[in-house]
Amino acid sequence: MSVQLRIVLDQAVQVVDADQARAAMSLAAGLVATAPRGCVVSALTPTGADLQIPGLQNVRALHLARRELAAAWQVGLAPGVGGGLIHAPSLMAPLVKHDRAHDSDQTTVTVWDLRAWESPETLPKSSVTWQRAMLKRAVKHADAVVVPTHAMAEKLSDITRLGARIRVIAGAAPQGFQVPDDAVLRREDLQLPENYVVVTGDGDSLAAGFRAAARADTAVVMIDAVEGTEPALADAASAAGVPERRAHIRGVLGDSDRAAVLGGAAAVVATSTARAWPWRVIEAMSLGVPLIAVDSGVHHDVIADGGVVVDAGELDDALADALGSGENRLRVLASDRARAFSWASSAERVWALHAEL
């Protein structure tokens, strides 16, 4: 009889967080590809899912849409789910009482960022409430809680009583993430200049990146801007010394457009110090883009020697070097570091985690 691992794919119908949705699908494919002998992978989804992941043993669509499912699981109602091995690539999981010792039931969840605890003002109140409630349920019922970096594991251990149940399994760039053949046309459609740096970050942290780009006398591109915040971000860039004509604020982009933008950048400047998986950083490294990042525990964990990690006040000099004599060296370092991350290796660690449990 085969061992079945069921992965929760809650965004198979409705995408709420594009990065986490991509990660879940990529991990599911990785679990299928790395399944040990005698093991199979199935999926748990909200109603109406139509998955295209080759190799899945079974897809069990529950009788609730995602929103209703999230509300039910938040209060501990999980009818029709059943037991066995369940892995959730987010906090969206049927966290209920189960017997791991006698019934071999296991439930593991994943926390990709800690903003709901560290900077709740940056998220909708409903999201903060839900995440905090689900983490409380995880403390009571999860057999393990996965985070992608050691810096996040340390913080999570401070705010919960999870102890040794916290495990570190990194993420990776989306499967097949690469600069498309029509990258130049895509950048033209987005009305981007030929030469620019990409600045990523959140809140006040962005100012340091904008200032560094202004002093390097280069155009700035920022992606992932929340709809409606573009004027404020353009004003912040202007206040930091970037002329309006050189500040290009763009919203959420699809994989191909995002790869075209990142791949065409002279450098990527990552300014956030939040304890959150740095999706754009890992994507930039996978494309071999020179990477400059503000010093933080997450950036040390993820970037290591794949880029330059400096204090915010040192971004100017670091970016100047990346745009000059240090460019080729940084491209090589980024590409080399990116090889440490893959969904296959992440999946292997998930299998090992459940085997250990």
Image (spheres, helix red, strand yellow):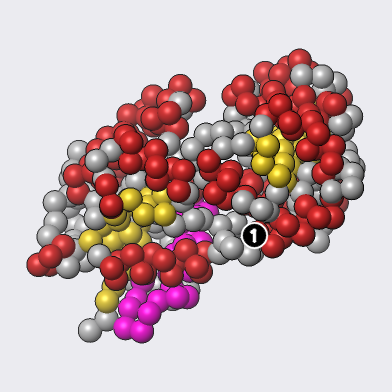
* Above or below: residue 178 compared with residue 4: above
* Above or below: residue 213 compared with residue 258: above
The local secondary structure at tag 1 comes to helix
Instruction: Name the spot of residue 121 as percent of width and height, x first.
Output: 45, 21
Label 1, on which residue?
338
Viewer-proximal residue, 345 or 262? 345
Task: Find residue 28 and report its image quarter.
Answer: bottom left
* Above or below: residue 199 compared with residue 352: above
Q: Which residue is at a point 51% across and 69% down the rendered structure image?
A: 344
Q: Which residue is at a point 73% across and 57% down the rendered structure image?
A: 333
Disc 1: CA contacts within 10 A as few (<14), some (14-19) or many (>=20)? many
Q: Which residue is at a point 32% across and 34% down the rendered structure image?
A: 159
Q: Which residue is at a point 43% across and 28% down the rendered structure image?
A: 118
Asked whether residue 229 is in view, the answer is yes
In this picture, residue 126 sits left or right of residue 64? right
Looking at the rendering, in which quadrant would you find the N terminus? bottom left
In this picture, residue 296 sits left or right of residue 55? right
Looking at the rendering, in which quadrant would you find the C terminus? bottom left
Residue extending furthest left?
A: 102
- Tell me if residue 39 is in the magenta stretch: yes
How many marks the image carries: the answer is: 1
Instruction: Name the spot of residue 98 as percent of width and height, x first.
Output: 14, 56
Instruction: Name the spot of residue 166 as percent of width and height, x first.
Output: 33, 50
In this picture, residue 11 sits left or right of residue 137? right
Asked whether residue 61 is in view, the answer is no
* Above or below: residue 2 compared with residue 58: below
Q: Amino acid at mark 1?
A: Ala
Magenta part of the chain: 21-48
- Tell me if residue 28 is in the magenta stretch: yes
Instruction: Name the spot of residue 132 as percent of width and height, x first.
Output: 31, 33
